[in-house]
Amino acid sequence: MGQSCASCQHKDEATPGQNGIELKDQLAEEDLDDSQDRESPPSTYQCKTMEADILQFQKIISNVKEEDYVEESKEQQIIFDDQSRYLGSIVNGKANGFGKLWLENGDFYQGDFVENMMEGNGTFNYLKGPIYEGEFKSNKPDGYGIETWPDGSIYEGEFKGGRKHGKGCYKWHQGCVYNGDWKDNMIHGVGKYDWPDGRSYSGSWIKNQMHGRGKYIWKDGKCYDGEYQNDKKCGFGIFYWPDGKQFQGQWFNGRQHGKGLMIGKDGKKKIGSWLEGKLVSSTEDENFQIMPEGWILQQQ
């Protein structure tokens, strides 16, 4: 079955109250930690991998003896040692051209073959798993393809060596959607992840985790534009409230940590020092700037 999207199951996130910067005491109570807000996207490794089946098939088919096949024939049959059966075009004793393969375990492939290998376009049906339709190379999905799971989850995009690799879009049956870069079956590179409740993250990813520069938007209009490490705010970032308030400053482990600048909806600025999300000191300075040199504001 398709992978469960744990991200979709968590509906609430820890975010600051509506009157966060009105008073100094309230400043100390700000909690901008969203580390529990989004569990890592699920791994998209198949429970029963096509790779394992194909390797078994390749081992079996390599042991087939070329017997007295005609030079060129169509709709001929090959029975393999494990009772897997091929029916289709045979040239020089090997599967070449269009054919069908019934694996002994119940899986089924139909499509193009070159020299006993799945090569070209085809469809691979798992008895207990997804259906892959697309390009094959050397017995593995390679190129553009669509992987559909029984529960309705679907991936459409690029594959390399049997794994999701390149550009692609995965839609989980719970409603989560990721569209962007993949590497070795994992979300890796730049892409956008949407939740069914209206939240979204657009930016950099490493091995299924938010990592690097990104923008996280909440359903009520709050927004964080900044740096992440291992799924948590870390480095410089700006947190925006719908009413115009914002925090600019340093983050660590998902919380404000270090120097920061709070800007009220009236434009008044307060400089502060934070320790693990708690304000420890603050002063007013209308001319203070904390934004790193070269930081480019992304359009909200």
Image (cartoon, rainbow, N blue to C red):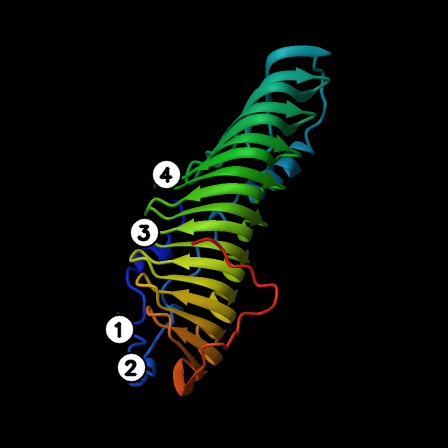
| Image quadrant in which you'd find residue 38 | bottom left
Q: x%, y% of residue 208? A: 50, 57
Pointer 2 residue: 23
Pointer 1 residue: 19
| Image quadrant in which you'd find residue 72 | top right
Q: Residue furthest front?
A: 286
**Sequence-earlier tag: 4 or 3:** 4
Which residue type carries mark 4?
Answer: Pro
Which residue type carries mark 1?
Answer: Asn
Q: Which label sits in the foreground, 2 or 4? A: 2
Q: Which label sits in the foreground, 3 or 1? A: 1
The residue sitting at 53% across, 33% down in the picture is 145
Q: How many marks?
A: 4
Numbered disc 1: secondary structure? loop
Q: Which label sits in the foreground, 3 or 2? A: 2
Sort mark 1 into few (<14), some (14-19) or many (20+) by Cα contacts within 10 Å.
few
- Quadrant assignment for the C terminus: bottom left
**Sequence-earlier tag: 3 or 2:** 2
Pointer 3 residue: 198
Whether the residues at callouts 2 and 4 have beta carbons within 8 Å, the answer is no
The residue sitting at 43% across, 51% down in the picture is 193
Q: Which label sits in the foreground, 4 or 1? A: 1
In the visual, does 217 lie left or right of 70?
left
Numbered disc 3: secondary structure? loop
Q: x%, y% of residue 281? A: 41, 89
**Sequence-earlier tag: 2 or 4:** 2
